[in-house]
Structures are given as C-alpha cells and as structure tokens.
Image (spheres, rainbow, N blue to C red):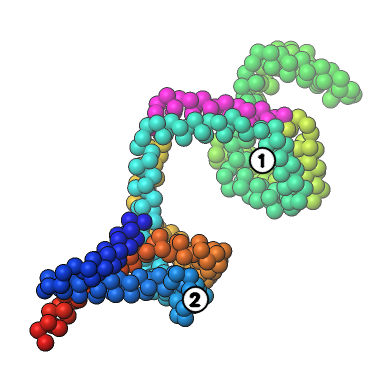
Amino acid sequence: MRTKYIASSSLIVMGIGFLLTLFMPQNIAVRLLQGGFEAGLVGGFADWFAVTALFRHPMGIPIPHTSLLLNNRDKIINSLISAMETELLNKESIKRKLSQTKIFKALANGIFKLIRKRELRKTMITSVKSVVETIPLDKVSASLQTILVGYVRNKELEPIVAQTAVSIVESKYDEKVLDYALAYGKQWATKPDSEALLGNLVHSKLQEIQLGGMKGFAVQAFLGFMSEEKLGSLLTGMMISSFDDLAKPDSEYRERILHEIRMQLTTAALNPSITLQLKSWLDTKLTNPSTQVFILNQLEELRGQLLNRLSSEYDNGGRLILTGFRWMTSTLNKHESLVQKWEQGILSLIVNIVENNYYRLGLLVKDNLDQMDDQTLVRMLEDKVGNDLQWIRVNGALCGFIIGILLTVLHMLV
C-alpha cells in the first residue's frame, strides 16, 4: 500500500532528523529543526497509534480502548445496517426513485439499441431455429392428445352444445347449409345421368304398384303415355323449379324447412342422450392412435413452415424483428394511458415486494459480515478506507513539524 509506505517514511524521517540534530553543533537553525523534528515525531507517532488502534492492538499490546473495530464489531455492524436502512437505502427513497422510472421507455430504448445490430438479430433467429428444431413433437402431440381427452371427459358438454345450436341460428349457418344443399341438388338434377336415373327409378316403381279397377287402369294408361325419358325430364324439371322456389328468401316452404331445422337443433341440444353419444364419439375419436398421428403430422407441417419462414428471415437480416418492434412501440405510444396504467401496476408490485422483503437487505449484509473472520474484516476495511487514514499520519507528522518550529521560536523569544 503506497500511502502506508509514505506515512511510515514520514515517521522515520522525523525520527532520524531528531536524532541527527542531537549530535549537530547547536545553533538557531539546528534548534529550530530539532524542535520541528521532535514535534513531528510525536505527532506522527500519536497519529500512527490512533490509526492502528482502530484496526488492531498497537505493537500487539492489548492496550485498553484499542482494536476498536473488533471490540465493537457487533455494534458497528448494527450501526451500518441501521444507517443503510434509515439513511442510505430507506424505503421512501426507493419508492420515490421507482415512481420516477419510466419502465417501458427504458426497456424500449435498451432493446432497440440491441436489435439494431444485424448480427444480433441473426443470432436471435438462429437460437429460435435451434429451439424449434429440438422440440420433441412426438411428446407434444401425446400431451395434446391427453389434454384433449381429459378436457372432453371432464367437461360438461350440454352448455357447449346448447350454445353451439344458438350460435348456428344466430349466425344463420342453418340457412347457409340449406342453400348449399339446394345448390348441390340443383346441380345434380341438371345432369343427364340424373334425369335418366330418376326416370328409370320412378317408372319401375310405378310398374310395381298393384291397383285394381279404374285406378289400376289410370296408372297403366299414364305409364303407357309417359316414357322413362319423359318421366325423368318431368321430375328433374319439378325438382329444379322446387329448388329455385326454396332458394327465395320469402318462400313459405323455405321458412317451414328452416323452422323444422331449428326445432331439431334445439331438441338435439336439450337431449341428454344425444350429448352423451356425442361425448362418447369424441372420446373414441380422441383416444384413437390415429388422432395422435394426425396431431403429429399437423405439428410437423407447422414446424416446417415456421423453419422456412425463419430461414427466409435470417437471409433478410431479421428485418421482421425491427418491424415488429416498431409496430409494438407505435401501438403502445398510441395508448399512453394504458401504458401508464401498466407501469403503475408494475411499480406498485415492485414497491410491495420491496416493503415485504426490505428487512432481508439488512439480514443479507449482516450474514455476509458475520461470515468474515476478524482478519478478513480488518483487511477489507483497511483496503477501503486505510489509504485515507494513512494520510492522517503524514499530516500529523508535517503539522507537528511546523508547530514544533513555531513553538521553538516562541520559546526562544520568551
């Protein structure tokens, strides 16, 4: 320690100077130097004793009121903790400082400084790709299947089925299904094969009718007049015309069909047996091994798409990260009141944590100090404040030297 060497050197200089003046011819200059060296020696030795007495016994002699730090170790530690809690790190100052902190702004500035670097963005993308590639999708698919099965088994499906029925009617999905069925039926009826099929089917069924008397004669006369082609054309024409009428919003028959569909939906939704059958069907489907295979295939496809997207973004230098960050900050800036609300919530949480755990700071300091032995504690304090204390010894020797000269002059005058 350089200051300790300087302090010891000043004391040695004063001692040597005093001894030399004892053997030098006595005159005014020698007497002045002798008085200065003598007072400097006394002052330097006294300050050495005072500084040393703070940390240890001077010269190893257990003189009373020396080694003050060790003799008052507990008192000093408690005073240090008390000063830290009440003055240096009191809760009010922490709360005041936290209340002035702009969390989101500080985070945004810090993150933006990082992601401006192209290499860092590419490193981030590489890390994400590594994580995505190492995800065990077989285990994930098995877990998802287990979660779905557990959800279906433990969930009451009656409210869900009822709500689904209501949603179908409110969203007019029943009308969309009917329109789809009508459009498909009309498309099917216009096919030549369909016309022939209907003609053959109806003609054969009419021939199977066994009626006597006038009714039987009328049916046979009708079959003789209507060939299979004519009958098929008539039927398809009737079907197409009926489909067109049912597609009209103001059709009376359309309303009747929709009313019947809605009645059946409501009845099914309120029927416990149907809900039970649906639950059993879902359970059977979900527990089937093919379901896990299906989930695994979907996850593999999703991972492939994600990896391709990440590779493209890597080649692009991770510009999407900057774009996404700017969009997020812009969105938050537009909702300043919401951001302030979030900040206040986070700050309140931090303040509560500080208040509930503030005493732990003192305990931590005390625990760390208690783990130090006497020599380590003294060495630490000397390293931190010893340099400044050694200058007290230097100043004591110099001041003593000057005061000694002044006192010698005063003595000579008197």
Magenta region includes residue 57: no
The residue wearing badge 2 is 62
Q: Could you tell me residue 34's position as x and y percent?
A: 20, 72
Q: Is residue 403 above or below residue 317?
A: below
Q: Camera-side residue: 402 or 168? A: 402
Q: Is residue 296 above or below residue 38?
A: above
Q: Residue at x 71, y 44 (%)?
A: 147
Most frequent secondary structure within the magenta stretch: helix
Q: Secondary structure at mark 2?
A: loop
The residue wearing badge 1 is 257
Q: Is residue 222 above or below residue 300?
A: above
Q: Camera-side residue: 371 or 83? A: 371
Q: Camera-side residue: 37 or 285? A: 37
Name the amino acid, label 1. Ile
Q: Could you tell me residue 320's position as x and y percent?
A: 41, 34
Residues in magenta, as a range: 293-319
Name the amino acid, label 2. Pro
Q: Could you tell me residue 190's position as x and y percent?
A: 62, 18
Q: Quadrant of residue 83?
A: bottom left
